[in-house]
Image: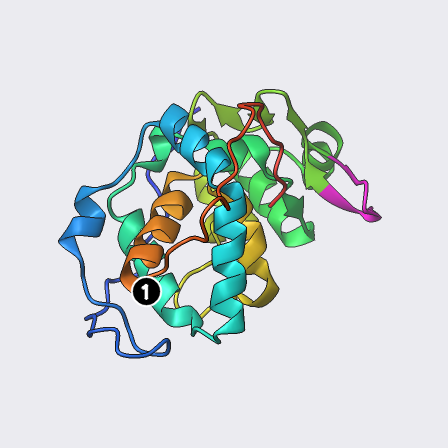
Amino acid sequence: MLLLGARSGLQRPHPWQRLRSPSDCLPRSPEVVLGLVTDLAEVFRLGTAKAEENLAFCRHLSAHHYADKPFQILVSDMQRHVDCTTCANCCRHSVVSVNKPEIEDIAWHLGITPEAVTHIYTVPDPDAPASRTLSSSGEGCVFLDGNLCMIYEARPKTCRDFPNVAVGTHSLGGRLSSLARWAALCPILYNALEGYKHLTGYHPHPGRALVGSGDATDIRG
């Protein structure tokens, strides 16, 4: 079976203006891009160490009513500089719900019946037994082969949309804290948060950073 490793279509970068207020678009900053951290061990180390700082930053954004769009644009730009096929942590740590049309798409892609897909590749959702999620193990999603998705062209919407911050498609709202928790696993989100701190002039409160234990965390998307 052909393994498809290309990432989904990314948002076209928007012209960025100088950030004069929280609602303005962000300037393109070569310094932010050049400082990318893509080594997964380092992303995990730094993201874990900055867990408390990142949550405080997200509370700061909410308290000061920063608009979603500038951060969404920054994430989109980071996606252009990070190769997801060298990571696949979202495939290892997410719980992926699937609906009937998505099961049918997977079945068509694999050349089997929807009933077979449901029986072999899904399990009841523990939070909603009437729904189904893709099976997973300690190695990640049942369809993950190395760092590549065996059903890439038929992957569910949850997978297509990750990290769910495309411009104009999702309101971040209370999800900022969830995104902050993903920072230790996802290079895109780690670098976007660090870049946004830089561009907004955010400075963490002394002593707020938390040094992590290094243990892996199963973060459900």
Q: Position of residue 97 (x, y in %)?
A: 67, 46
**Residue 187 relative to residue 121: left or right:** left
Q: How is the image coloured?
A: rainbow
Q: Residue furthest right?
A: 129
Q: Which residue corresponds to the image point at 81% horizontal and 46% vertical from the top-left?
A: 127
Q: Is residue 77 above or below residue 170?
A: above
Tell me the crowding category of disc 1: few under 14, some 14 to 19, or many 20 or more residues within 10 angstroms, Cα based. Answer: some
Q: Which residue corresponds to the image point at 70% horizontal and 41% vertical from the top-left?
A: 133
Q: Amino acid at mark 1?
A: Thr
Q: Is residue 127 magenta?
A: yes
Front-most of residues 134 and 27: 27
The residue that mark 1 highlights is 200
Q: Position of residue 20 (x, y in %)?
A: 26, 78
Quarter placement of the N terminus: top left
Q: Is residue 175 above or below residue 217?
A: below
Q: Which residue corresponds to the image point at 35% horizontal and 51% vertical from the top-left?
A: 192
Magenta: main secondary structure: strand
Q: Secondary structure at mark 1?
A: helix
The boundaries of the magenta stretch are 123-132
